[in-house]
Amino acid sequence: MLGEAVGAAPVPAQYDAGGRGAMQAEDLILVSVDDHVVEPPDMFDGRVPAKWKDRAPRVIHKDSGIDVWSYEGNEIPNVGLNAVVGRPPEEYGIEPTSFAEMRPGCYDINERIRDMNVNGVLGSMCFPSFIQFCGQLFARTKDKELALAMLRAYNDWHIEDWCGAYPGRFIPLSIPAIWEPALMAAEVRRVAAKGCHAVTFSENPSKLGWPSFHSDHWDPFWTACADEGTVVCMHIGSSSEIVVPSPDSPFDVLITLSPMNIVQCAADLLFSPVLRKFPSLRLALSEGGIGWIPYFLERVDYVYTHHKAWTGQDFGDMLPSQVFSERIVTCFIDDAFGVESRAHLNVDNICWECDYPHSDSTWPQAPEMAMKYLDGVPDAEVNKITHENAIRLFQYDPFSVRPRESCTVAALRAEATDVDTSMMARNPKHEKKQVFAADLGHIGRD
């Protein structure tokens, strides 16, 4: 456990003599703003207009034993690391996999709830998988009428079938029609009417071939999100770019540096016109961690004050760090240093993540792992980080469906006493080879 937080407040009466919060792991209420769904094979059934039914994505089982999505002449596999929860770490890998090799909670909504319960997690926001983080699969579709039909079918399935199956347990997250800002705006408004107030977007759209944050190209989209109170979620990897020093860097380097894309995103976004032009807009840096932020804020303020005279930047009566702290939602899975440094952050904009079923997930011991860095944090701040901020920012109201006392780790786990959380091998033993970061580019091609 790291030391006490910098600038900690005096100890209120409700804390013990040592200044430590009274909350225990079983008392937590956990809402994860970063999980993932492995889309089930039947997700498009009954959701596609008749004229497009035969062109909807479908799952094919290959002779090699893997399952792939087939769409418009392309085959898209589920990458192993995206669905390894419940498997021994020695089985982790980037090889394409099959549904049979996954824990059912990856793709089955009923089993997902059971896995959430046994992990003590009340609420979850799930990013997409085979369509990519911001729907790039549909954006690459040549027939844009088809693309829009598939995108709307996806969003309706996610909101109505995945999230709607268990009211109060999920935060809906839509994907954008990223190829046309006017369509993006219309879809934001359409799904907001269905109760969805979060949308995915790229951490660097210029890497996907579209204009950057510095362009007014996206203004219809930003306007709709600001009007509807929709949070724009920029997940690491949503630029389809990886950060590796060299082609033969081991895969450990790629995993270590993955959050670096979000740091680049934060700088590019902060010095763009977006946040100043749309003051009510909120953006989330998903799975980017928070430990890097104090130095980042110090650096952007230094750059601004020293260089604004010739670069032309103008934040008015605010500093860049103040704009960031007010408008940006920051998210982390396991970040003891970041929690210790929270005095330098806006605690009202920090959210917790579980990352189920990815390889970084803390399932099934999320509460215990969280308490390693939340132990000693005032209960009021723990509540903000673990659920209150997510409830407020994403217009999510689980307590209207489920009594608060039934939302704790202890209460949820009491409903899942029959869930097996033991590690289960699903692949026969095979020779392991060293994996390099460059190998990721071969998935789907080999």
Image (cartoon, rainbow, N blue to C red):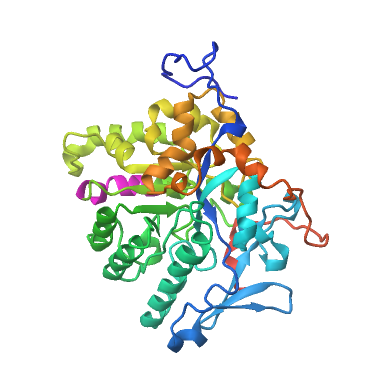
Q: Give x and y (percent) for residue 95.
A: 67, 64
* Total marks placed: 0
Rendered position, 321 above or below 62:
above
Which is nearer the eye, 144 or 106?
106
Q: Could you tell whether 362 is left or right of 189 in the image?
A: right
**Quadrant, the N terminus:** top right
Q: Could you tell whether 186 is left or right of 149 in the image?
A: left
Res 24 → quadrant = top right
Residue at screen point 37% across, 62% down: 194
Res 37 → quadrant = bottom right
Q: Could you tell whether 432 is left or right of 251 in the image?
A: right
User: Is residue 284 found inside the magenta-colored segment of the image?
Assistant: no
Q: Could you tell whether 163 is left or right of 175 in the image?
A: right
Q: Give x and y (percent) for residue 303.
A: 28, 36
Identify the residue at the far top of this view. Answer: 17
Q: In this view of the protein, can residue 98 be seen by the observer?
A: no
Q: Main secondary structure of the magenta part?
A: helix
Which is nearer the eye, 309 or 27?
27
Q: Give x and y (percent) for residue 309.
A: 16, 37
User: Is residue 266 found inside the magenta-colored segment of the image?
Assistant: yes
Rendered position, 35 above or below 339:
below
Rendered position, 188 above or below 422:
below
Q: Give x and y (percent) for residue 9.
A: 41, 17
Specify start and end residues of the magenta stretch as a single range: 265-277
Rendered position, 331 above or below 439:
above
Which is nearer the eye, 147 or 435?
147
Q: In this view of the protein, can residue 384 be seen by the observer?
A: yes
